[in-house]
Amino acid sequence: MTLNIDKLLEDPVVEAMSQGKETLWFRQSHTPTAQALDSSGLNADLIEDARQRFERFAPWFVRQFPETSISYGIIESPVHGLHHLQAELDDRQGSQLPGKLWMKRDDMLPVAGSIKARGGIHEVLQVAERIVVDAGVLKPTDNYARFADADVRQVLGDHGIMVGSTGNLGLSIGVAAAALGLRTTVHMSADARSWKKELLRSRGVSVVEHPGDFTEAVDAGRAEAEADPSVHFVDDENSMALFAGYSTAAHRLAGQLRALEVRVDQEHPLMVYLPCGVGGSPGGVSFGLKHLFGDAVRCFFAEPTHSPAVTLGVRTGLHERISAFDLGLDGKTAADGLAVARPSELVGRALADVVDGYATVTDQKMLALTALLADCEDIRVEPSATAGLLLPWRVAGDPDFRGTSGLSETQWANATHLVWSTGGAMVPEKEMDGYLLEGHRELEQVQLG
């Protein structure tokens, strides 16, 4: 397909993206959530199926990863209020955010420490379950702590799993698959951090490094897996199993918000800001949230200015047929987990009427916010985890959105702003110190207002 770039650049948003500038735009159609979900063609049963699979494997998690015993093997992250950061950013913005600022701490997710763990681990579990059930070794009604037994691991050892990744997805799949005894290979792009590769190798995972970007790593993994019928390929660009794993977050979040006495309904809207790479994780989370909360929740994606894959695909309507490279962007970003140039075919097409808005943010701001979050709340995360931190102010302060959102001033005042974090807990201290040092330098230079 030949792209008419000059024609695409007539759109001021696309033109701004091509120059690496920050952008913010909103879905123009006001399709009711129920109708948008119905037209997505995605079955809501996948959410419950994935949730039940996580529950079946809970005894195995307790046995294999003792840190999960405090939640009886359920993999979940906490929700924390960001009172001090909200006050600091109110001051820097020169305007008060209506509502309260919270963070969903997927940087603290057990086992793999990022939002990618939700989808990546789920697909690994689905593959392992299918193998042992088909082999007659276990039934779905058995105690899945047996997955740690030698005879089950021997069956799984005859099978492999492979994925292409910029880092966090490969980390989650590698850790979980290796723990189950599956032969595991992760193809990693040039953007992936060295410590993630080293951690995977220490768990017995084969890491194949590529000089190119995310798409090259994915293509290489796919080609290698196709040549070996005993190997399952995890396709980050088009996987329903990954998507289903991400979608389960909504059910648990609802319970956490109730425990915190945070209401979510038409008069108390929930505004969720999600970091976005290829689109699978924010797409799956949004799908689950929209099914649970309907029109009471609004979801916004945040991407790096140098790698705006999903926002470019949806804005142009070209989805996976266009890449950030087509605009002359280099795809380089400090947010390595978001370093994706071409979006997911699944998410862009299915959820175009579900996601409410799309934004891009500079590396300088993500790094500065990494330092500011640590200073204000003692929360240490990767730069990609801060991609959505300024979005509440940008969205609430946008006159177009304020005018078309249908939210009254009272509803805005009652709003819950939930910024979704991603990686952090597994980052080595030296690496994190480097992020914070660079972040503090940027904090002295960049305007967060």
Image: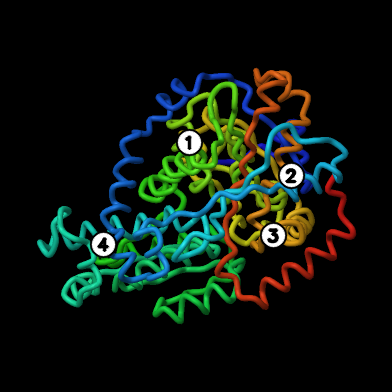
Real-space CA distance between mark 2 and mark 1, rounded to the nearest whole angstrom: 21 Å
Q: Residue 157's quadrant in the figure?
A: bottom left
Residue identifier under label 1: 289
Amino acid identity at mark 2: Leu
Q: Earlier in the sequence, mark 1 or mark 3?
A: 1
* Image height of 378 relative to 53, above or below: below
Labelled pair 2, 3 in contact (Cβ < 8 Å): no
Q: CA distance from mark 1 to mark 3?
A: 28 Å
Q: What residue did someone put label 2 on? A: 390
- The structure residue drawn at horizontal position 51% and vertical position 63%, both measured from the top left corner, is 113
In the image, residue 130 sits, relative to residue 316, either above or below, namely below
Comes first in the chain, label 1 or label 4: 4
The span from disc 3 to disc 4 (Cα, nearest Å) is 34 Å
- In x, y percent, where is residue 316? 62, 34
**Front of the two marks 2 and 3:** 2
Residue 318 seen: yes
Foreground mark, 1 or 3, reads 1
Circle 4 residue = 128
* Residue at the farthest left position: 136
Sequence-earlier tag: 2 or 1: 1
Residue at image mark 3: 333
The type of residue carrying mark 3 is Thr
Dot 2 surroundings within 10 Å: few (below 14), some, or many (20 or more)? many
At mark 1, the secondary structure is helix
The answer to whether mark 1 and mark 3 are in CB contact below 8 A is no
Q: Dot 1, how many residues are within 10 Å of its Cα: few (below 14), some (14-19), or many (20+)?
A: many
Label 3 SS: loop
User: Which residue type carries mark 1?
Assistant: Leu
Q: Amino acid at mark 4?
A: Ala
- Quadrant of the snapshot with the C terminus: top right
